[in-house]
């Protein structure tokens, strides 16, 4: 998928529809419409970009809403959280070295977009830029202002600043966008990759700048806004799942099993349900067998005693009768 994360938006822009349609023809899949904020922020921050544009947009194109905050003072960052909540992507555009250092070290944003067509007062430092890359922040390179610039100095500044930025970042953490206000400023993904190789980025890194790195910006921004601290995404909130009716022979078999189980566990007198008795364990069976064996042996012993008593009584009776007969004789 190819990304263009910087297409300027304005309410009365007639070229926007043509630009979006041309980006779709060039093969881009995700386009971010950019609203720029500068100066004093309004009391209530809301995204003016409508969810559905007033003109037809290609169905295959995913449109995102982005805010670019021009940071002219280091004390202008107290409402960044509110701005980030109103947009899909938040980009910071520092105007000097102090604001650039603050954006790299502390500000919570997804993109640091520097106006590379201007002559910069200081050089990029690897230590400062690497802190932002380690936090997941990406640096943006916009090619359209340099391509369409009438003044040759803007094109010269763009080439020099981009080369310096690539050298300072070691070619990592870079995103290439168009920032095209008209369709003429857009370039195809293959042309952007070739342009990046001219700047010294290389074709592989150039493709990552419009694919992998740009995708990481979108995913990181989505995680920050839909999860807890960008780490845990709550998918299941503990709701009881809805019961789905069973169909076919398997559903009938399960229904019969449920009816049998309910018939066993249901008490017919009071209508309440009782727990089904547990099956006897192996030790319980052994105890029952031992008890039955003992009772059977006990009953046999008593019968033998009774029989022996009867035999003794009979012998005594016979001996007594014999003695009586002898006396009579």
Image: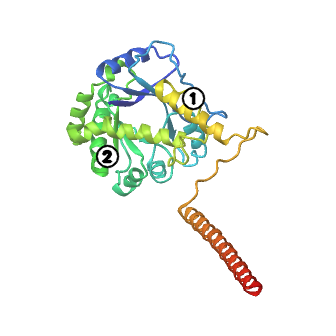
User: Which residue shows up at 43% across the image and 51% down it?
Assistant: 135
Vertical comparison of 77 with 305: above or below: above
Identify the residue under disc 2.
165
Sequence-first disc among 2 and 1:
1
Residue situated in front as seen by the camera: 85 or 139: 85
Give coordinates of residue 6: x percent, y percent: 41, 30
The tally of labels here is: 2
Give coordinates of residue 303: x percent, y percent: 65, 70
Q: Secondary structure at mark 2?
A: helix
On the question of residue 301 being in view, the answer is: yes
User: Which residue shows up at 54% across the image and 46% down it?
Assistant: 73
User: Which residue shows up at 33% across the image and 28% down it?
Assistant: 144
Give coordinates of residue 258: x percent, y percent: 59, 35
Left/right of residue 179 with respect to residue 221 in the rendered view: left
Task: Report crowding for label 2: few under 14, some 14 to 19, many 20 or more residues within 10 A (C-alpha).
Answer: many
Q: Secondary structure at mark 1?
A: loop
Q: On the rendered image, what quadrant is the C terminus found in?
A: bottom right
Left/right of residue 209 with respect to residue 223 in the rendered view: left
On the question of residue 93 being in view, the answer is: no
Q: On the rendered image, what quadrant is the N terminus found in?
A: top left
Left/right of residue 72 with respect to residue 136 in the rendered view: right
The image's mark for residue 63 is none
Residues marked 2 and 1 touching at CB (< 8 Å): no
Residue situated in front as seen by the camera: 292 or 189: 292
In three-dimensional space, the C-alpha distance between marks 2 and 1, rounded to whole angstroms, equals 31 Å
Vertical comparison of 16 with 312: above or below: above
Disc 2 versus disc 1: nearer the observer:
1
Vertical comparison of 319 with 99: above or below: below
Snapshot colouring: rainbow
Identify the residue under disc 1.
47
Q: Residue furthest bottom?
A: 327
């Amino acid at each position: 998928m190819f990304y263009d994360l910087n297409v300027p938006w304005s309410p009365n822009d007639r070229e926007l529809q043509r630009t979006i349609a041309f980006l779709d023809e060039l093969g881009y899949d995700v386009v971010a419409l950019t609203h720029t904020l500068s100066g004093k922020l309004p009391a209530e921050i809301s995204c003016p970009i409508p969810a559905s544009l007033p003109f037809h947009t290609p169905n295959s194109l995913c449109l995102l809403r982005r805010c670019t905050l021009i940071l002219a003072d280091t004390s202008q960052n107290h409402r960044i959280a509110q701005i980030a909540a109103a947009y899909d992507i938040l980009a910071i555009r520092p105007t000097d070295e102090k604001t650039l250092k603050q954006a790299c070290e502390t500000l919570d944003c997804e993109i640091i977009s520097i106006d590379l067509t201007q002559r910069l007062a200081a050089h990029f430092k690897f230590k400062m830029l690497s802190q932002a890359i380690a936090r997941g922040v990406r640096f943006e390179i916009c090619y359209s202002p340099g391509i369409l610039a009438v003044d040759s100095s803007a094109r010269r500044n763009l080439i020099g600043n981009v080369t310096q930025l690539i050298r300072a970042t070691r070619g990592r953490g870079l995103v290439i966008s168009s920032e095209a206000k008209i369709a003429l400023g857009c370039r195809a993904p293959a042309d952007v990759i070739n342009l990046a190789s001219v700047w010294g980025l290389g074709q592989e890194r150039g493709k990552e700048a419009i694919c992998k790195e740009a995708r990481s910006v979108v995913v990181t921004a989505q995680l920050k806004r839909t999860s807890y601290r960008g780490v845990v995404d709550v998918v299941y909130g503990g709701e009881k799942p809805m019961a789905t009716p069973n169909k076919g022979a398997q559903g009938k078999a399960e229904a019969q099993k449920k009816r049998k189980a309910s018939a066993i566990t249901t008490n017919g007198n009071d209508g309440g349900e009782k727990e089904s008795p547990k099956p006897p364990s192996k030790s319980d069976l052994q105890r029952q067998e031992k008890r039955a064996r003992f009772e059977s042996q006990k009953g046999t012993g008593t019968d033998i005693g009774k029989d022996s008593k009867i035999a003794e009584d009979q012998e005594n009776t016979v001996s007594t009768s014999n003695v009586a007969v002898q006396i009579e004789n």
